Image (cartoon, rainbow, N blue to C red):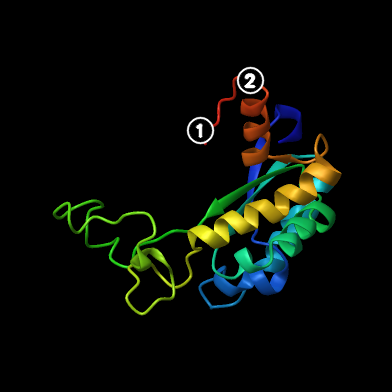
Amino acid sequence: MAEHNFLVGLSIDGPQMLHDAYRTNRAGRGTHKQVMKAVELLHKHNVSFATLTCVNNLTSKNPLEVYRFLRDEVRSPQMQFIPIVEQKTFRTDAPQTGSSSQQLRQGDKRLIPGNSNSIMEPWCVSDEAWGNFLIAIFDEWVQKDIGKVFVQYFEASVETWMGRKNHFVL
């Protein structure tokens, strides 16, 4: 893989406790140990990889723990953070159906996961938690890791801020 310049996407959501909360195998056991074995193999064989980290209701509360784990333990050269946002009825209802009065607007309490009348699955990340997650990691990244660790959202934002063209849609 290394000789052909493959870039492997590795799904890992942080330290074992956070990763295993939602990433389980068919037997219901966490997959963190298997993923860490894959990390060892990727490093051993000099295979390029990027970590793909799902930000959910748990990981969003631990941004620096997640980031530092990926940076220091996994030694991820590239990171992508993916907000988990899933409607409870996504399997049965097409998005944006119904009258305009039923359509959701920013600030609608039904968009906050965990509320009794929420339309979102409880494991989702709220908009506020997602923003706080990114801000905490950005503050650490810009002070210690800019130019060393590639974080897709941040690199694209900096390129845009500098007036450079980037190929990532924010």
Question: Which of label 2 and label 1 is nearer to you?
Answer: 2
**Residue annotated with mark 2:** 163
Q: Quadrant of the N terminus?
A: top right
Residue at 32%, 68% (x, y): give it: 119
| Crowdedness near tag 2: few (<14), some (14–19) or many (≥20) residues, C-alpha within 10 Å | few
Q: Secondary structure at mark 1?
A: loop
10 Å neighbourhood of mark 1: few (<14), some, or many (≥20)? few
Amino acid marked by disc 1:
Val
Toward which corner of the image does residue 104 lie, by quadrant? bottom left
Residue 79 can be seen, yes or no: yes
112 or 14: nearer the eye? 112
In screen coordinates, is 137 left or right of 143?
Answer: left
Viewer-side residue, 50 vs 95: 95
Number of the label disc, if any, that sits on residue 118 = none
**Residue 60 point in image, percent of width and height:** 61, 64
Q: 13 or 148, which lies in front?
A: 148
Q: What residue appears at the point 52 percent right and 36 percent down from the top-left corner?
A: 170
Q: CA distance from mark 2 to mark 1?
A: 14 Å
Residue 11 can be seen in this image: no
* In the rendered image, the vertical position of residue 155 relative to residue 82, given as above or below: above
| Residue 134 image point, x, y percent | 64, 52
Write down the quadrant of residue 112 in the picture: bottom left
In the picture, measured across the screen, residue 132 lies left or right of residue 45, that is: left
Mark 2: amino acid? Gly
- Residue at x 74% of width, y 56% of height: 67
Residue 169's disc number: 1
Residue at position x 59%, y 24% in the image: 166
Res 106 → quadrant = bottom left
| View extreme (left): residue | 99
Q: Position of residue 59 (x, y in %)?
A: 62, 66
Compared with 19, 167 (above or below) is above
Label 2 sits on a secondary structure element that is loop
